Image: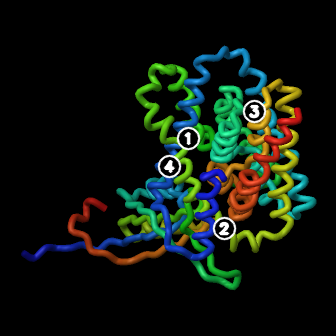
Amino acid sequence: MNMTTHRRCQLTIIAEYVLESRLVAVVAHHGAHGYTVHEVRGGSFSAEGERQRDGAGETLRTIEMKVICDRPVAEAISAQVIEDFGRNFSVRLMLSDVEVFRPGKY
Amino acid sequence: MDPLILLFALGVIARLARSDLRFPEPVYEALSIYLLLAIGLKGGVELSHQSFGNVLLPAVSVLVLGFLIPFVLFPVLRGIVRLNQADAASVAAHYGSVSVVTFAIASAYLERKGIRAESFMPVLLALMEAPGIIAGVILARQAGAKGGSVMHEVLVNKGIVLLAGGIVIGLLIGSEGFASLKPLFGDLFRGILALYLLELGLVVGGRVPELRRSGARLIGFGILTPLVMGVAGLLIGHWIVGLSQGGAVIFGVLLASASYIAAPAAMRMAVPEANPALGISASLAVTFPFNVFVNIPLLYRLGDLL
């Protein structure tokens, strides 16, 4: 069976656990239809040494949020996340092209 | 030797030795929910045998002291520890609030020594969670921090919901209703606290590298603050609030302990420009072990002299 697919944009946000409810509010505000969140672990390497974000407690945990939407929506969400949280929080944002089967869902 | 302390030490050593031992996050979460609820429930059941008039003065005292502590510590953190305003406000909030596990260890310690504290102590614990954090937010605002509003989150954080909720449920069900819960929330308490301390040891061990970066002044602050606050709390608890020997020791421990769950999360949002590592490292990696190994036995000895 040959199924038709449609191009959408996937925005991936890796951020501090404490930001989850704020990120959900931003995503909803810009009109995305939904999101997925799961917890991840990670760390970083810098001149100051290795930092691991894998501890217990909310300030040491990390989430990854995925939002599939139209590109302008993803860009608007990204711009606001960087504006609101980019300076003082650990936040990473990535955009990628994905193919979906039911475009009305996104 | 106290098995609780030995398990905590095992956790620290395992982490420092880079062992692969790790608790899954949901297990840690479940253990902390259990501990908070168990302390609340047992406190509520004990309280159901008491009259409310006795609780009023101690309750007002912890609300006022919890709120004032950050204002006292803020100038110390600015002038002596030399932190910037945002960091000083954030760390001050950690020390205004309380550590539930330090409270649990102190209670277990007194129990082993055969000394009883007033049954309303868990109520004081629940009341003292929030005021210090609110004071920290006010200090940060005065310093020009532009964080979001966190009042709602502070007042409904899981610590307060479970402790206060447990106390109310304990009050309503009394000893009779608690009988069916006792196997889980009473008999298993020490064992589950021991498991939690193993995990906490792993977390503390992981903070040691961070601690080296935060400097000797903050480490000194993390030791001297609980020492001074603990003794002050013991004396205030005994002479002004009129608590028994055991009650005054726990009162001192409440003032001496620093939050490492509720305060870090709240201050992260209220004062985003503050370095979150400072508060957690000081409260968890310095003050918590200091309280457990030195301060609780010390306050117990001093309490003996009262």
Q: Give the residue at mark 1.
A: B36
**Residue B272 in the image: x percent, y percent?**
68, 59
- The amino acid on which the numbered mark 3 sits, given as a three-letter code, is Gly
Q: Are the two marked residues, 3 and 4, in contact with CB atoms closer than 8 angstroms? A: no
Instruction: Name the N-terminal-most of marks 2 and 3.
Output: 2
Task: Single out the mark in the foreground, 3 or 1.
Answer: 3
| Spatial CA span between label 2 and label 3 | 32 Å
Colouring scheme applied when the structure was drawn: rainbow
Q: Give the residue at mark 4.
A: B31
Instruction: Name the N-terminal-most of marks 2 and 1.
Output: 1
Q: Residues within 10 Å of mark 3 (few under 14, many from 20)?
A: many
**Residue B254 in the image: x percent, y percent?**
74, 40
Name the quarter where the C terminus of chain B is drawn: top right
| Spatial CA span between label 3 and label 1 | 21 Å
| Spatial CA span between label 2 and label 1 | 24 Å
Instruction: Name the N-terminal-most of marks 4 and 1.
Output: 4
Task: Place residue B305 in its image quadrant.
Answer: top right
Please tell me whether mark 4 sits on a helix, a strand or a loop. Answer: helix
Along the viewing direction, whichever of B225 and B75 lies nearer the viewer: B225
Please tell me the numbered disc located at residue B207.
2
Residue located 38% across and 61% down the image: A36
Residue located 82% across and 63% down the image: B218
Q: Give the residue at mark 3.
A: B246
Query: Are labels 4 and 1 assigned to the same chain?
Result: yes
Question: In the rendered image of this protein, does residue B259 appear above or below residue B200?
Answer: above
Task: Place residue B222 in its image quadrant.
Answer: bottom right
